[in-house]
Amino acid sequence: MPPPPILLYRRRWTLVFQVPFVLLMAMCLAFSLYWASVSNDRLLTILCLCAAFVSFCVGGTLGRSALEAYREQDPAVVIDATGITDLRQDDPYTVPWEAMERVHLDGYEGVILVKLRPGHKDSALGVIIKTLKRWQQRGDVVFALGGLAHDPRQIQTTLKAFHAAAASKPRTRLS
């Protein structure tokens, strides 16, 4: 009997920490812009404008991710009998179990690493690009779990069960 599918959602409780920090960055931005406008010293004006830029970048990035986490009600990643589906991009994609040679949960970095089965029609350049990507990311496909509520033991058990079930099925080879 296959394990039940796992639906991974964004952590909404992190908003408790992100929203006050975004408000703090907005206050720093306003304070820096105010001091840049009233200062007669060029060095202080430049420093205040740099601080305003940093506050804008950090606050904007965190504010955007907080807004996305608040708005998003659907699962971000689905692990089921068909494969692993990442729904966070504009163009969601699924990596089927049959295409995976190896799948592993790296609990330290919070990612699912997938090594795909070698294709029999890869060009030399394609092999080099795949090898470089695998070396850099440690896998052909990487599913980041940062910001998602998950249980590492449950995910590892489910990955092993689905991958073993797919490996036991006879594969048909297309030429």
Image (spheres, grey):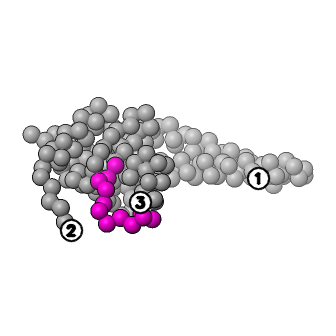
- Rendering coords of residue 100 (x, y %): 27, 50
Which quadrant, please, contains the N terminus?
Answer: top left
Residue 102 appearing in the image:
yes
- Rendering coords of residue 103 (x, y %): 30, 44
| In this view, 124 is above or below 114 | below
Residue type at mark 2? Ser
Q: In terms of secondary structure, where does tag 1 sit? A: helix
Give the residue drawn at x 28%, y 48%: 101
Please name the residue that numbered disc 2 is placed on.
Answer: 175
Which quadrant, please, contains the C terminus?
Answer: bottom left
Task: Tell me whether the residue at label 1 lies in contact with that at label 3, contact meaning CB atoms closer than 8 angstroms.
Answer: no
Task: Tell me whether the residue at label 3 lies in contact with that at label 2, contact meaning CB atoms closer than 8 angstroms.
Answer: no
Residue type at mark 1? Leu
In terms of depth relative to the viewer, which is nearer, 164 or 79? 164
Give the residue drawn at x 50%, y 37%: 17
Mark nearer the N terminus (1 vs 2): 1
Q: Name the disc covering residue 148, or none.
A: none
Distance of mark 3 from mark 2, alpha carbons?
A: 19 Å
Distance of mark 1 from mark 2, alpha carbons?
A: 61 Å
Distance of mark 1 from mark 3, alpha carbons?
A: 47 Å
Q: Name the disc covering residue 49, or none.
A: 1
- Rendering coords of residue 21 (x, y %): 57, 40
In terms of depth relative to the viewer, which is nearer, 55 or 102? 102
| Horizontal side of residue 134 vs 83, given as left or right | right
Magenta residue span: 115-127
- Rendering coords of residue 87 (x, y %): 33, 55
Please name the residue that numbered disc 3 is placed on.
Answer: 127
Q: In terms of secondary structure, where does tag 3 sit? A: helix
